[in-house]
Amino acid sequence: MKMECWVFLGFLLIGVVPAGAVVGVGGGVGFGFGVGGGGGDNPNPVPLGPPSQEQNRAYSVLQAWKSAISDDPTGVLATWVGSDVCSYKGIFCTDHKSGEISVTGIDLNGANLRGTLVKELALLSDLTLIHLNSNRFSGDVPATFRQLPSLQELDLSNNNFSGPFPYVTLYIRRLIYLDLRFNSFSGPIPEALFFQELDAILINNNQFDGEIPQNLGNSPASVINLANNRFTGAIPASFGFMGPRLKEILFLNNQLTGCIPQGVGFLSQIEVLDFSSNKLFGRLPDSFSCLNELEILNVAHNELSGVVSDLVCSLRSLVNLSIADNFFSGFNQQCRNLFGGFDLSFNCVPGLNMQRPPPECSAIPGIGLNCLPVTWIPRTLVCGRLVGMSP
């Protein structure tokens, strides 16, 4: 079964994962992981006994990391004493059928630790998750992380990491959840990011720039957040061909230009689309009529124009439509029925209050430009397929 969205909608939109939250395979937000850990709070601790070779290795690794942490205001590391690493707060173990006990999870969300990551962490080869949300870690993501064969979730959000995109994450072969939000990473993002088998790509609130790679549509992710960066250029046409796997994608607050791709209509299971606070122009594609699962559509603060069609306003699941601060000139009957719930301010709709002054409405950005691809033009978009294509 296709994996559902990784985070609650409200958390995703504001870009915050609560301290202590563990985002797990199968969706939703839970707390705790595996067996042992949590500084002795777990009701089913790993039985005590002579430390195994694996535990001895974990002890050396965690002590090396402890020495690289310079500030621990909540006293997490006070529990990192002795060879029983499974009793360390934030460290979670699994008792395997073979009788071997290994560290399989690190969850230090919200600990406010200051320090760096150490290369020795890659020796914890059974790690399936590393959650470090809301700390003050900085420096690089160690190149040795590519040697973590079981790692599925990596959450480095809300820290002080900087520098270029951490390419090592592209070599973690089982990774399906990548969260780099709220850091200071900069520069372009690699094309290879959208070839990975990631179900969640959360890189918002950084300083990434350049164009979004043209292979965006190759990503199998169900959640992609590119918001609050410095991306320029057009939204790749391939975006519209990601198909039903995509549930949420956020482009808001970048410097994107051009049109919303007509292929958006193929995103038949999309629930959240946010294009706001860019420089997009042209009309809303009629193919929006295919998005019957769409709940939130935000195109505010762009340079879009034309009439807001009934095809948009009659979407059966739509509960939030934001179109303020554009150049829309009108809306049809179905939109009028919904008028009370939508902000139409700072557009060009005759007879409404709080609209742009006439001189601005006579110079609509991008007017007359063709938003369809130049190589082929679909005559009709029937939801899920194209009917009649000219060469």
Image (cartoon, rainbow, N blue to C red):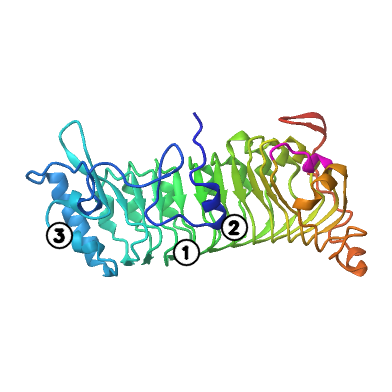
Q: Horizontal placement of 372 versus 44: left or right?
A: right
| Residue, disc 2 | 227
Give the residue at x 54% y 41%.
221
Q: Please, what is the three-letter code of the amino acid marked with disc 2?
A: Ala
Could you give the CA–CA distance between mark 3 and mark 2, rounded to whole angstroms?
41 Å
Instruction: State the extent of the magenta-drawn residues as a range.
Output: 310-317
Q: Position of residue 375 (x, y in %)?
A: 79, 41
Q: Quadrant of residue 30?
A: top left
| Residue, disc 1 | 183
Q: Quadrant of residue 319?
A: top right
Q: Is residue 316 magenta?
A: yes
Q: Position of residue 173 (x, y in %)?
A: 40, 42
Q: Horizontal placement of 325 versus 87: left or right?
A: right
Please identify, in this view, whether the residue under mark 1 or under mark 3 is nearer the observer.
3
Give the residue at x 69% y 61%.
277
Could you give the CA–CA distance between mark 1 and mark 3, rounded to whole angstroms?
31 Å
Give the residue at x 80% y 38%.
376
Compare residues 329 and 224 and report the one nearer the observer: 329
Give the residue at x 19% y 59%.
80
Q: Please, what is the three-letter code of the amino acid marked with disc 3?
A: Val
Q: Position of residue 225 (x, y in %)?
A: 56, 52
Numbered disc 1: secondary structure: loop
Numbered disc 2: secondary structure: loop
Q: Please, what is the three-letter code of the amino acid marked with disc 1?
A: Asn
Ranked by sequence position, the earlier of labels 1 and 3 is 3
Contact, CB < 8 Å: mark 1 with mark 2?
no
Label 3 Cα neighbours within 10 Å, binned few <14 / some 14-19 / many ≥20: few
